Amino acid sequence: MKANYHTHTARCKHAWGEDKEYVEQAIQAGMEVLGFSDHCPWIFPPDYVSHTRMEPKELDGYFTSLENLKREYAKDITIYIGFESEYIPELMEEQDRLLKDYPVDYMLLGEHFTASEVTGPYTGHETKSEADLQRYVDLVIEGMETGKYAYVAHPDLIHYIGSDEIYERHMLRLCQYLKAHDIPVEINLLGVVEHRHYTSGRFLRIAQKAGNSAIIGCDAHTPDRLSNVAYIQNCLDLAKMYDLPVVDFLPDFMAKA
């Protein structure tokens, strides 16, 4: 594995380790590129504090720390600074204003919520509602159409437990969109090794049908996840099982919008 673009930091309140430890583990693993993509802040009501993402006041420290590491390890690895974020249309303008003065290299679209976190249910909760599934796929495609996002993190995060026929109808739309735009589907290492509902064989069969390529995303919340050879091999084996050619590097991941 030569590159990983899905890396978190302790600022999101559910990851552990120092920023430097993530860099050193990536170097130890022989990676050439490490992209940090911690959970991006939103502008929430003053009385609400998210327990799953950094706060706006932490942005300065995030960029200062990672820019220092870029310089310190420039001879050993290329470091990019980005975010994993939902696409929530009604909140985008405020987020854009929040980030406009920061040198963001790239964004991943991780649709954990399809509405504000304050009121919206977590996408990964079980649902039998086709409307939930359709809204998820529609918003992910709409978000990717903005050109802001490099790829979709854990694209099968939506935990639809209804009809396989309905699931395939909507997820095939997503996979076909990604194929048409030469965007790989993420095989999410965190989900695979922790036996979560993603990345699932059900989804990968649909990706195979659509002819998608794949990228391994460590979704690292601890530094050791970047250098665990067995875990990475599990993901590569899944890609091979479903005939998904693996993309190491994102050739044009800079935001287009």
Image (tube, rainbow, N blue to C red):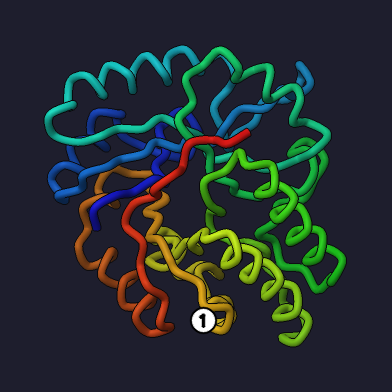
Counting from the top left corner in percent of width and height, residue 12 is at 50, 33
SS label for mark 1: helix
Q: Residue 137's quadrant in the figure?
A: bottom right
Percent of width and height locating residue 27: 16, 42
Tell me where residue 123 appears, x and y as whole percent. Answer: 70, 56
Asked if 22 appears above or below 171 in the picture, the reply is: above
Left or right: where does residue 104 sit relative to residue 176? left
Image quadrant for the N terminus? Answer: bottom left
Q: Is residue 140 toward the left or the right of residue 119 in the image?
A: left
Q: Residue at x 32, y 19 (%)?
A: 67
Indicate the position of residue 226 as horizontal and vertical percent values.
27, 50
Examine the image and state in which quarter residue 62 appears.
Answer: top left
Residue at x 84% of width, y 70% of height: 129
Pick the front one: 226 or 35: 35
Quarter holding residue 47: top right
Q: Name the foreground residue: 249 vs 20.
A: 249
Camera-side residue: 120 or 98? Answer: 98
Residue 207 visible, this orientation: yes
Report if residue 112 is visible in the image: no
Q: Which residue is mark 1?
A: 208
Task: Give the residue displayed 70% in from the left and 61% down from the top.
Answer: 125
Tell me which amino acid carries mark 1: Gln
Q: Is residue 177 left or right of residue 226?
A: right
Q: Residues within 10 Å of mark 1 (few under 14, many from 20)?
A: some
Q: What residue is drawn where x is 31% and y is 71%?
A: 236
